Amino acid sequence: MADSLRWTREAGQLRLQGELDQDFLVPLWEAREEATQGVDTIDLSQISRVDTAGVALLIHLAALIRAQGKQVNIVGKSEKMNTLVQLYNLPADLIP
């Protein structure tokens, strides 16, 4: 089990690793503008856990990327993530 949330930004991709939940997402929230600069892809393949606060943060990160005039691509979504999105009946384009 991961004990934190880490991220790196490289070649237009923001890679998240660890747990994307309310206990660990504050540092990314505080760095969200810097973390999304020049990014068009968010990679979730190394996320071990996500909760509703994590989904909300992803929606916000996607909006920041769109505000830069870019199309957002989110890769590596788990089945649990997809289930959360469906349970909240979120439009597919919020977390593409």
Image (cartoon, rainbow, N blue to C red):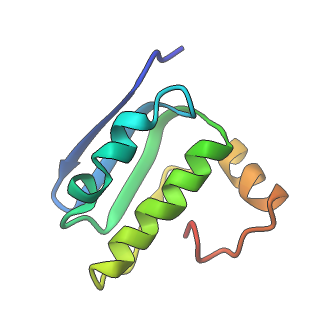
Image coordinates of residue 8 in percent, x first then y, are: 23, 41
Taking the image as shown, residue 29 lies to the left or right of residue 87, namely left
Taking the image as shown, residue 95 lies to the left or right of residue 72, namely right
Q: Quadrant of the N terminus?
A: top right
Q: Quadrant of the C terminus?
A: bottom right
| Residue 29 versus residue 71 in the image, above or below | above
| Residue 66 versus residue 54 in the image, above or below | below
Image coordinates of residue 82 in percent, x first then y, are: 70, 54
| Residue 8 versus residue 88 in the image, above or below | above
Taking the image as shown, residue 38 lies to the left or right of residue 25, namely left
User: Which residue is situated farthest in the bottom direction here?
Assistant: 69
81 or 90, nearer to the observer: 90
Image coordinates of residue 43 in percent, x first then y, are: 40, 51
Taking the image as shown, residue 52 lies to the left or right of residue 44, namely right
| Residue 48 versus residue 42 in the image, above or below | above
Counting the numbered discs, the total is 0
Residue at 57%, 33% (x, y): give it: 22
Residue at 60%, 51% (x, y): give it: 55
